[in-house]
Amino acid sequence: MAELQRHLAEADRIQREEYPSCAGRPRLEVFPQLRHSGRRYTRAWEERTWSLLRVEEQLAEYVAIRRVAATGHVSVYDHGRYVGVQYRGQWVQVQYDPQKHGWVISDSEGREIRRHEAPEISREQIKKLTFRKPRKKK
């Protein structure tokens, strides 16, 4: 339980303090009130309200732009996904498909190139917070 709490606290800190959000600035810098929501967390509340479907629907609204590496791969949550060596050096779009529970990779014109399963997008993996490698401290 303590390990899970440490993972959760670290993921929360990274999201608020490191990831650029508003004009390249972290959310906590732009919205200092995010330091605490004011609500107390309980496991019972989480069990009642947490929904993988809601997570997937939210995730589907984002498009990530990735450059294809020389090996033909792009990185999605620290996992290499093969696109094809013929696309090396090109920019592609990565989006989550909630109906197929997987990643859709498209070219810059929006034409689908490839699909990949997304086993990291599951209740178990999200609760473990183990779908990405830990960042090096600055």
Image: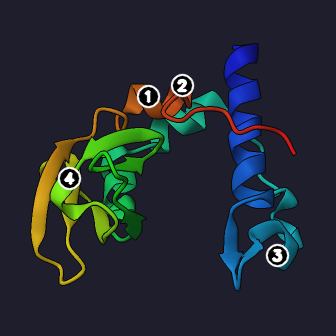
Q: Coloring scheme of the render?
A: rainbow
Quarter of the view holding residue 40: top right
The CA span between labels 2 and 1 is 5 Å
Pointer 2 with pointer 1, Cβ within 8 A: yes
Q: Tag count in the figure?
A: 4
Q: Which residue is mark 2?
A: 128
Q: From the viewer's perspective, is residue 135 above or below residue 43?
A: below
Q: Residues within 10 Å of mark 3 (few under 14, many from 20)?
A: few
Q: For residue 110, what is the image quadrant?
A: bottom left
Q: Could you tell me which residue is drawn at 31 percent across and 61 percent down?
A: 57
Residue type of the residue flagged with mark 1: Gln
Residue 22 in percent (x, y) is at: 69, 81
60 relative to 85, above or below: below
Q: Secondary structure at mark 1?
A: helix
Determine which of the numbered discs, if any, sits on residue 31 in the image. 3
User: Badge 4 is on which residue?
Assistant: 85
Which residue is identified by label 1? 125
